[in-house]
Amino acid sequence: MSNVQQSLDSMLGLDGAMCCALVDANSGMMLGQAGSGLDLELAAAGNTEVVRSKLKTMSSLKIADKIEDILITLGKQYHIIRLVASKQGLFLYYVLDKSRANLALARRKAAEVETELAL
């Protein structure tokens, strides 16, 4: 098991990784951050709304399932939102440079960190 900062720092080890954060989806506040390139406080708050909206839509559609991750593909970046299954209300936010990142490896890394995270 890794603490929050070790977990986030390990995510930056992948080629193309720019920044990442652990976010409390109940408040929109960050519990930890690593890297640079974005205003992570603003991104945490905004992506909290993305998670809430998707959960609300799933509830309205009566989809009895869990979100593993949400991928947002921009022209130059990938944004991965990975919900922490063992800690309800938390998610990892991961930003990668699209021209240098391997999306499959990044998703695996986020899943690995999610399962090993210790608070």
Image (spheres, grey):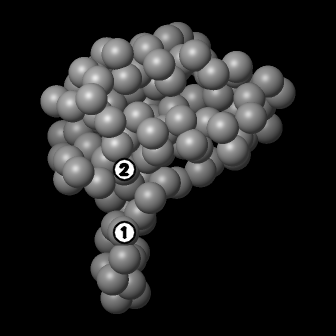
Q: Quadrant of the N terminus?
A: top left
Look at the image and tell me whether residue 89 can be seen.
no
Amino acid type assigned to the residue bearing label 2 in the image: Leu
Q: Quadrant of the C terminus?
A: top left
Amino acid type assigned to the residue bearing label 1 in the image: Lys
Which quadrant of the view contains residue 57? Answer: bottom left
Judged from the image, the secondary structure of the residue bearing numbered disc 2 is strand
**Residue 34 appears left or right of 36:** left
Look at the image and tell me whether residue 77 can be seen.
yes
Q: Residue at x 50, y 24 (%)?
A: 11
Residue 101: x %, y % from top left: 74, 29
Question: Of marks 1 and 2, which one's residue comes earlier in the chain?
Answer: 1
Q: Which residue is drawn at 36% across and 69% down?
A: 66
Quick one: label 1, few (<14), some, or many (20+) residues within 10 Å?
few
Looking at the image, which is closer to me, 13 or 27? 13
Judged from the image, the secondary structure of the residue bearing numbered disc 1 is loop
Disc 1 target residue: 66
Determine whether 1 is above or below 80 in the image: above
